[in-house]
Amino acid sequence: MRTITVIGASLAGLHAAMSLRAQGYDGRLVIVGEERHRPYDRPPLSKEFLTGALTAERLALADAGEIGELDADWLLGTRAEGLDPPERTVVLADGRRLATDGVVLATGAVARALPGEPLDGVHTLRTLDDAAALREELSRGQVRVVVIGAGFIGAEVASSCATLGHNVTVVEAAAQPLLPQLGARMAAFCADLHTDHGVTLLTGTGVRALHGDGRREGHRAGDGHGGGAVRGEGGRTRVAWVELADGRHLPADVVVVGIGVRPATGWLEGSGIPLDDGVLCDAGGMTTVPGVVAVGDVARSAGHRAEHWTSAMEQSAVAARNLLAGATVETYTALPYFWSDQYGIRLQLAGHPQPEDTVRLVEGAPEDRSFLAVYERDGATTAVLAANRPRPFARLRRQLSRSGGLAAV
């Protein structure tokens, strides 16, 4: 291969590029990124960056020396619009066509939005620009924040907003936050974390619509006598309240929508790359199209798509090796691992918990906000969960990894 193009200047894309160089690839390396930023760390966006504890500069995933060692051509602020595998060409939004011998698909995922008219004050949180816009709004004084979705991102945003002194309400359609991921017992613990810190948690109801109206102070468009809707800086109506599915109305100055993501694969339609909730690939990241691999959040590897930091990084080295070999010579089989920081508590989860699993406490207790627990099925441990117990968690995680995901603990 004389030219390899990485589509996506993300964690996965960066580590794929680094792995290619580390494994001896010395040809032309092109990195295409839709965002204008060099690769940065996303997990702090909902936490330290949102609260102001970290600057954008400190989010960088590589320093100037590491960027230089890559010897790559960076095309930032550039969107890929198509891939033509038979012609070995990547089509860019500005009309350019890049000839390439190999392609790494690392476009990640995009945040899901609620349907309806766009309103100022409504945010999703996926990119650095998203986080910067939300942080700017939160810096203007105490506001009423409604977070829609109590998953990991929603919970972290709620935690950060509460830390900043805002009035926070979290709306979750499920009966408990993180119920599918953690089960009822541990989901109850996560619910208590919100209420412990003065956050209002409303569960078992979804959102019907977001509304803007003319009942708030500020510049009004209309008759010149105070009538009409409140307009944001871009001439759009600003959000004023949230209508819940059960009929309740929540006043809101800022709304953060955290209802999950969808893989960024639209640009690949018609390319011949198999797509189904991501780019279909084997456990080594190889697609059925020669010379094309997928890594990170966009990759549905062996029927599973892992939206985790560690997976994105580790998959990339495996996929790079297989791309250079031209076949799957290595597979990625590491145990899923995820962490989340909420209200001063670090939650860590490793393994494959299922709703039917039984949870057993090994150390501590949820009411003490520090514990180590295991998920068990048919006498074997399937997952490990910890709150502020990093060392014993690491031990059990290693044990579970060595056993291939099922162990007696």
Image (cartoon, grey):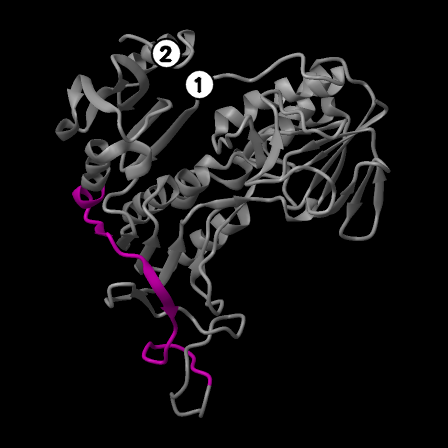
Query: Going 29% across and 50% down the picture, which residue do you hit?
Result: 172
Query: Going 63% across and 13% down the picture, which residue do you hit?
Result: 330
Label 1: few (<14), some (14–19) or many (≥20) C-alpha neighbours in 10 Å = many
Kindly identify which residue carries mark 2.
400
Locate residue 200 relative to residue 354 in the image: left or right.
Answer: left
Query: Going 23% across and 19% down the picture, which residue do you hit?
Result: 372
Q: Nearer the viewer, residue 212 or 356?
A: 356
- Tell me if I can see residue 78 in this picture: no
Label 2: few (<14), some (14–19) or many (≥20) C-alpha neighbours in 10 Å = many
Quarter of the rendering containing residue 185? top left
Numbered range of the magenta stretch: 194-221
Query: Going 75% across and 15% down the picture, which residue do you hit?
Result: 325
**Residue type, label 2:** Leu
Mark 2–mark 1 contact, CB under 8 Å?
yes
Locate residue 170 relative to residue 88 in the image: left or right.
Answer: left
Q: Position of residue 17 (x, y in %)?
A: 69, 25
**Residue type, label 1:** Leu
Q: Is residue 397 above or below residue 27?
A: above
Choose the circle earlier in sequence order: 2 or 1: 1
Locate residue 261 relative to residue 156 in the image: left or right.
Answer: right
Q: Nearer the viewer, residue 388 or 81?
A: 81
Q: Quadrant of the C terminus?
A: top left
**Image disc number at residue 80:** none
Q: Position of residue 310 (x, y in %)?
A: 49, 24
Quarter of the rendering containing residue 405? top left
Q: Position of residue 108 (x, y in %)?
A: 58, 39
Kindly identify which residue carries mark 1.
335
Does 196 lie within the magenta span?
yes
Q: Is residue 342 above or below residue 119?
A: above
